[in-house]
Image (tube, rainbow, N blue to C red):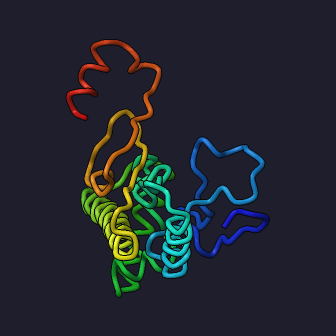
Amino acid sequence: DSSGYTTQRLRIRDILNRPYTSPWQRGLSIKNPYWGCVNNPEFRILFLNAGVNLAKLKPYALFVDDAIFNARLKKEQLGGCFCHYCLNQFSASVEEQEKVRVATLAFFKKGDIDDDQKELISSYETFQFQSVLNFLVDWKEQILFLYPDLLFLTNNYNGLWNELYQVFDGGIAELDRAFINSSSLDSLYGVA
């Protein structure tokens, strides 16, 4: 949905309530560099409809570029998406939602947090990861119901084949230059 307008209300929100932009898109002049939130019902519908519309063209596969979605923010130590859909699905308790925000913000600003806050952030990151996994499994199942012969592909960083990527039938590992040597490649071939 990037053709000429921005739908920020469907997007991942960081701890400072900004729409999340992937690191490699920062500074580019594109209209909608923001990633969709897998817990936002409108984004789920949008993504499913886009997949179905592509499947109607009868490709052999659908390719999802960087299928990590909300779980990406763990890698950047931001905990995940903090939109109201995510916070409400994580906990119905406003007090618990605020605790997650405070812990993540404290970590984001100074990196020094207590063990309870670390555990809370870890729980929130696990929730975000599981949300992405559920989103991908549901999306794939719904499209396969209509197009049972379709394959699903994705890419990942340096051969990371965790549960999110295992939803797909195959994909490509985008390697960092530091890994382009025979010992690193041999280890990545073994993982693949």
Whether residue 83 sits left or right of residue 139 in the image: it is: right
Q: Closest to the observer: 108 or 177?
A: 177
Q: Closest to the observer: 156 or 117?
A: 156
Q: Quadrant of residue 133?
A: bottom left
Residue drawn where x is 63% and y is 75% of the image: 9
Q: Quadrant of residue 187?
A: top left
Residue 13: in sight, yes or no?
A: no
Q: Closest to the observer: 178 or 167?
A: 167
Q: Quadrant of residue 10?
A: bottom right
Query: Where 100 falls versus 154 (above or below)?
Result: below
Query: Quarter holding the N terminus?
Result: bottom right
Residue drawn where x is 78% and y is 48% of the image: 29
Query: Where 26 falls versus 9 (above or below)?
Result: above
Whether residue 7 sits left or right of residue 57 in the image: it is: right
Query: Quarter holding the C terminus?
Result: top left
Residue drawn where x is 30% and y is 19% of the image: 184
Q: Position of residue 174 (x, y in %)?
A: 44, 33
Residue 28: in sight, yes or no?
A: yes
